[in-house]
Amino acid sequence: MAKVTASVYTSHVPAIGAALDNGKANEPYWKPVFDGYEFSKKWIADPENKPDVVFLVYNDHATAFSLELIPTFAIGTAAEFQPADEGWGPRPVPVVKGDPEFAAHIAQSVIQDDFDLTIVNKMDVDHGLTVPLSLMCGQPEEWPFKVIPFAVNVVQYPVPSGRRCYMLGKAIRKAIESYDKDLKVQVWGTGGMSHQLQGPRAGLINRDWDNEWLDKLIEDPEAAAATPHIDYVREAGSEGIELVMWLIARGAMSEGAKPKVAHRFYHVPASNTAVGHLILENI
Amino acid sequence: MALDKPYKDIPGTTIFDADMSRKGYWINQFCMSLMKAENRERFKANERAYLDEWPLTEEQKQALLDRDLNRCLALGGNIYFLAKLGATDGKSFQYMAASMTGMTQEEYAQMMLNGGRSPEGNRYLDEQTGEKQ
């Protein structure tokens, strides 16, 4: 049977991808960001931890979805996903290979569990999905595992509630664990942490709030899931609301047993954003 | 009954909700068109003529021509869409962010290096008016 072995949480700042793609990772501004992922790259390359499939929760930034269509939850069921041209040419990263059979299984199970997903058979993926892959895997010729993209609307308000995301995570775990193939699966939650990209309040960062929220996510995910939208917006900035996506990954972890915190990292700034990163293992 | 919008009292922040999205539909769809190189070329060749092809209000067109991003936000623009206009102009995202805050890009970048804008005094509108008085 397939099994959720671990969950990974990370910001997906586009400037991080650009820094890596343009050979700036060792510059003094960027080095502290990439240093925070050195452990993670070794961890994920270790055969003990290396997943067969990553269920990657992210958001599209007006790339695959314009205002013509705004799905709240969309699962990518294609065999592959091209890195998108976001206006300055596609990132020079490998094509993302999907797992159509497994994705279809998850979609069916989760929809029958009352979460009405949109199924996407053709979609380009933007920095929201490819930057986390780059942070965790560096610059390989091919990504070392299959990826099931799962896009959440966090652009147009109201976005799904933290509680809804957390419950969805549980349904995703159930779907994964009912799949017959022996697969090691990780669920990743991306975006955040505190940042605001718009208006006179742009540049807002809230280090204390971010770290308290990380503590809560680890220790008491129900409490983190109860965080109302307005708290994210007021305390962590209008784009800090992306953190609801982390609750999907947290909901997919085993219940009852506290996960092992394999790694925790926090850094300000990456361009306009506070970078947060966690690796939690099921034990 | 009106919907509860508790985010209206946050200073310097426009929440892109379904009402704003409806208001700014064409601003954002215009920006989306700039994902294609040929459209970027046509826009750069004659901005006004390109904007006239879209059912935008005059106010929206002027805000876009002026690159007045705060005005664009007030008229329903969303920052992820507006970023495509910035990219067409060859501007970094940090340049765009700074332009909305009244700071130079250098001042803004320095603020970020110093840990970002503090939430202190930036949570509620009345905190800000209080400070100014």
Image (cartoon, coloured by chain):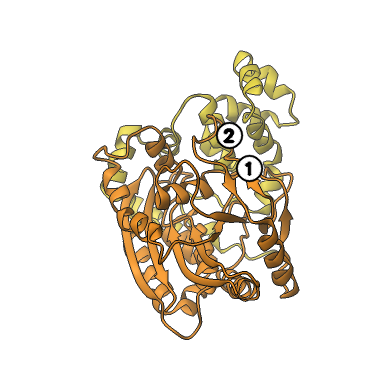
Chain colours: A orange, B yellow
Q: Residue B97: x and y, percent?
A: 43, 39
Secondary structure of the residue carrying numbered label 1? loop
Nearer to me, A40 or B75: A40
Front in this rendered view, residue B115 or B104: B115
- From the image, tell me which residue sits under label 2: A85
Q: Are marks 1 and 2 on the same chain?
A: yes
- For the residue labelled by badge 2, is the local secondary structure a helix, a strand or a loop? loop
- Residue drawn at (69%, 36%) of the image: B29
Left or right: A107 as drawn, with respect to B67:
right
The CA distance from mark 1 to mark 2 is 8 Å
Residue A187 lies, with reference to residue A143, above or below; the image says: below
- Whichever of labels 1 and 2 marks the residue nearer the N terminus, that label is 2
Q: Residue furthest top?
A: B45
Q: Quadrant of the N terminus of chain A?
A: bottom right
Residue A240 appears in view: yes
Q: Which mark is residue A45?
A: none
In the picture shown, does residue A272 fall above or below B96?
below
Q: Position of residue B96 (x, y in %)?
A: 45, 34
Residue type (three-letter) at the residue carrying disc 2: Asp
Residue at the spot x=74%, y=68% of the render?
Answer: A108
> Which amino acid type is shown beneath numbered disc 1?
Asp
Q: Chain of mark 2?
A: A
Disc 2 packing (10 Å; few <14; some 14–19; many ≥20): some
**Of A20 and A101, the residue lying toward us:** A101
Q: Are marks 1 and 2 in contact (CB under 8 Å)?
A: yes
Where residue B103 appears, as percent x and y from the top left, is 36, 36
Q: Quadrant of residue A248?
A: bottom right
Please give the residue where the numbered disc 1 appears in the rendered image.
A124
- Looking at the image, can residue B67 be seen? no
In the figure, is residue B55 to the left or right of A31? right
What is the x, y in percent for residue A35?
28, 50
